[in-house]
Image (cartoon, coloured by chain):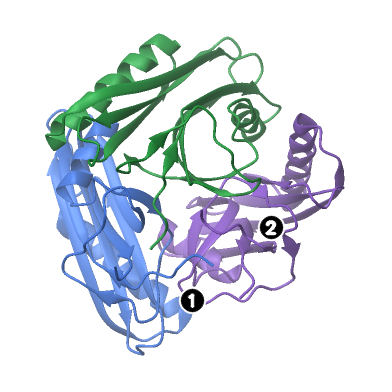
Chain colours: A purple, B green, C blue
Amino acid sequence: MLPIPEKFTLSVGKGEGKEKLTAFDAALLDAGIGNMNLLRVSSVLPPRCVYVEKMDMPFGALLPIAYGSITSDVPGETIAAAIGVGIPEDADSFGMIMEFSGFCKADEAAQRVESMVVEAFDMRGLKLKEVKVKAIDHVVEVCGSVIASCPLFYKL
Amino acid sequence: MLPIPEKFTLSVGKGEGKEKLTAFDAALLDAGIGNMNLLRVSSVLPPRCVYVEKMDMPFGALLPIAYGSITSDVPGETIAAAIGVGIPEDADSFGMIMEFSGFCKADEAAQRVESMVVEAFDMRGLKLKEVKVKAIDHVVEVCGSVIASCPLFYKL
Amino acid sequence: MLPIPEKFTLSVGKGEGKEKLTAFDAALLDAGIGNMNLLRVSSVLPPRCVYVEKMDMPFGALLPIAYGSITSDVPGETIAAAIGVGIPEDADSFGMIMEFSGFCKADEAAQRVESMVVEAFDMRGLKLKEVKVKAIDHVVEVCGSVIASCPLFYKL
């Protein structure tokens, strides 16, 4: 079996590039995850996975991560992404991670993602202790990107 | 090297949510894979990977999975997804997994995916013993989603 | 932690199929990666990851891979994909992988991806030793696909 992640953090970033992929890359760098190999997952917080403010990860490591992202090359457009993690009341239970991205402000993205976490807990009959949310927005200059992410990693 | 999966199953689900992501989440729950971290792969059945009716997986585990999925917020629309796994005649060979999703009934999705498996075996000059197929459809109420999947996992 | 890849290669392919997914599958086969489980990553070359011309990989293995791909069912359309890997001057540093796909010739795709690698190194203040690039194009017959990839694997 692949090892189950033991730590998580929340990380957001924004950036500009000459191409959509390099704008996305700039956002990843701003979020502190630009030097990892992102392995996108969908989207469960494993039981007893511990929140940390900052995560040490070796360059090029395979990093399981849930994220929302949006990239635009329309100058003046407002883009936003948000990530929300629902922590369960029962510490032995798992939690849920939800992401959102769209053409709005960070506040609205944060609200959307928070209500999605609540809905995901309701569907499972799980009790919610706390929702951690981070959101970011950006007004596109030339080609801009935002990301809101929940990297999942391991004790080193 | 990452460990090669040893077991597989076929699993379909459908659901409704307030947002597209929560509708997808409801479909995952219905398919019995809503509490895992899906790691989407493309799409080979490893040699000697064993079919099981039901798979035990710890919450939050990283689950390699091939799937087709479609989500719609147009009430009345019919959406469908199908998954097909081609089992090779030679037990030491690998097999192929194909997925399909679209606006049709489950029957049509199943036929499409079955012929894709046949085509994938033909391209490789592999002999086909059996195609396992599962398909599902759903008429969207508010925001609906279907998934047809082949989770790949390990002996615990 | 998931194991960090130790070897990489560059691989391109093109193919035709009856459906978009089987056309993509034909391109994967042509690129020599059609019998693996692709695990798409985004997109860092780990430090001291070694270039090899040819990579041995067991059937059905989970293969971390960065790639650009495009599939079209419009006969006569020219489609292209390119992959570029920037090797750092400092052998202990990491490198960057960039991919591109679009409606153009292989030459143009190669140029786009090369300048993206340069931009990614500039953003990080990294010194570039060399950019390895591979590109491919294809004129669609019925349903065609191209892929340009950087598979990342392990010493066996």
Residue C67 in the image, given as x and y percentages of width and height? 32, 55
Tell me, yes or no, if residue C76 can be seen here: no
Q: Mark 2 belongs to which subunit?
A: A
Query: Which residue in the protein does label 2 denote?
Result: A136
Between the residue at mark 2 and the residue at mark 1, the CA separation in whole angstroms equals: 25 Å
Tell me, yes or no, if residue C116 can be seen here: yes
Note whether A27 is above or below B59 in the view shown: below
Tell me which residue sits at (70%, 73%) in the image. A54
Tell me which residue sits at (35%, 58%) in the image. C66
Residue C109 in the image, given as x and y percentages of width and height? 23, 57
Tell me the element at label 2. Answer: strand
Q: Nearer the viewer, residue C54 or A24?
A: C54
Mark 1 residue type: Phe
Residue C65 in the image, given as x and y percentages of width and height? 35, 58
Residue B109 in the image, given as x and y percentages of width and height? 38, 17
Locate the C terminus of chain C and report the quarter of the image it occupies.
bottom left
Tell me which residue sits at (29%, 43%) in the image. B47
The circle on residue A75 is none
The circle on residue A59 is 1
Q: Quadrant of residue C111?
A: bottom left
* B7 left or right of B35 in image: left
Q: Mark 1 belongs to which subunit?
A: A
Q: Name the residue furthest bottom.
A: C90
Note whether C52 is above or below B14 in the view shown: below
Q: Quadrant of residue B29?
A: top right
